[in-house]
Image (cartoon, helix red, strand yellow):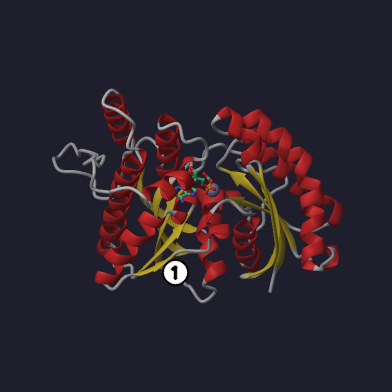
Amino acid sequence: MATVLALETSCDETSVAIVRDRSVCSNVVSSQIAVHQPYGGVVPEVASRRHVELINPAIAQAFQEAGLGWSDIDGIAATCAPGLVGALLVGLTAAKTLSMVHNKPFIGVHHLEGHIYASYLTEPTLEPPFLCLLVSGGHTSLIHVKDCGVYTQLGQTRDDAAGEAFDKVARLLKLGYPGGPVIDRLAKEGDPRAFPLPEGQISLPEGGYHPYDSSFSGLKTAVLRLTQKLQDEGPLPVADLAASFQRTVARSLTKRAIACAQDFGLSTIAVGGGVAANSGLRQHLQEAAAARGIRVLFPPMGFCTDNAAMIACAAADHLQRGHRSSLSLGAQSRLSIAEVMQLYVS
Ligand code: KG4
Ligand code: ZN
């Protein structure tokens, strides 16, 4: 049994959690969405400054809610890659300092490995191998989960991430930020077949298309062109546009995830990231997977979006396997999920 305190500050949520193996003792999440809303997206320097203000109160609250003290903690973790470097540095520096002060092991965690571990929090009996479909504002990845620290990225986006596409389309429809929840809501009132939109395909040099990689920038441009054309014809059918866009993204992600699971003989797809909240994706993927005998796990929303509980859960597993990070570990804006074990000294 390992009890871990973890800090997550890779983007715009300041989060601190205490987790015992796969069980959450506390999970404090201070969202910065309201701070960034006037800018229509996350402003990195603003995010870093806000993390500095929020991190110490969040640590205190995490202990209070868990009813635990420092003597109960076996290790201290922080997200160290990938993410906004200035933002990552806040949690990372705090965690390394606390590790020195309290003489506890320090564990750096890859943010995407955290998203994978969100599924273990919801389904503690889940064991690899399985496929993780990770769809957030920064990532669209299909990851073959083989063991703790052992991952192969099978599919990715070649341009915009799925959540980024939702945010950009929402911006051009003047729906505000973040775009996913509002498009999801509007899509329920619209006709998903109103406008046929192109699903991005990645051509292969030898002919045909990449079976697992996606592209959303062409879809975004198609919505822009369509919007410009429709604007001249009268009031914009926003709900129909939202529904048609959402259906295209959901179908694209579902097709790739199912192909990947079938080709690699994986019978479980665990979904993570903010876009996992999308009702269109949930419905499409559940239906397609059920028809092929594939199990799909959608963690509750609080574990899909960024949170420190998933980071603590990953760190607890690494800690139990004897993996520790050096106190000289730095923040990295990019790091492949296949390189996770670089973060540990033993
Ligand atoms: O995982 P997350 O909280 O942060 C990142 O690591 O990026 O994901 C945020 C993204 C945003 O792009 C947001 O628009 C999208 O998740 N999102 C959604 C929904 N709720 C959040 N996208 C589609 N449908 C939703 N219901
Ligand atoms: Zn994330």
Task: Measuring from the top left, give residue 301's x and y in whole percent.
Answer: 53, 58
Residue 231 figure quarter: top left
Q: Is residue 148 visible?
A: no
Q: Nearer the viewer, residue 18 or 248?
A: 248
Q: Nearer the viewer, residue 222 or 291?
A: 222
Q: In the structure shown, which secondary structural element does the residue marked by tag 1 occupy?
A: loop
Q: Which amino acid is tagged 1?
A: Pro
Placement of the C terminus among the 4 image quadrants:
bottom right
Q: Nearer the viewer, residue 186 or 78?
A: 186
List the single residue furthest toward the top.
Answer: 232
Residue 38 figure quarter: top right
In the image, taking residue 113 as reference, residue 34 lies left or right, namely: right
In the image, taking residue 226 as reference, residue 318 lies left or right, namely: right
Looking at the image, is 245 positioned above or below residue 23? above
What residue appears at the point 26 percent right and 39 percent down from the top-left corner? 200
Q: Which residue is mark 1?
A: 128
List the single residue furthest toward the front.
Answer: 234
What residue appears at the point 36 percent right and 55 percent down from the top-left corner? 280
Q: Is residue 27 visible?
A: yes
Looking at the image, is 227 positioned above or below residue 110? above
What residue appears at the point 57 percent right and 67 percent down from the top-left corner? 121
Task: Measuring from the top left, give residue 296's x and y in whole percent.
Answer: 38, 67
Q: Mark 1 packing: few (<14 Cα in 10 Å), some, or many (20+)?
A: few
Task: Measuring from the top left, give residue 321's x and y in whole percent.
Answer: 61, 67
Residue 25 figure quarter: bottom right
Task: Measuring from the top left, give residue 27's x and y in whole percent.
Answer: 69, 60
List the single residue furthest toward the bottom.
Answer: 125
In the image, taking residue 145 as reference, residue 251 lies left or right, namely: left
In the image, taking residue 280 as reference, residue 10 lies left or right, namely: right
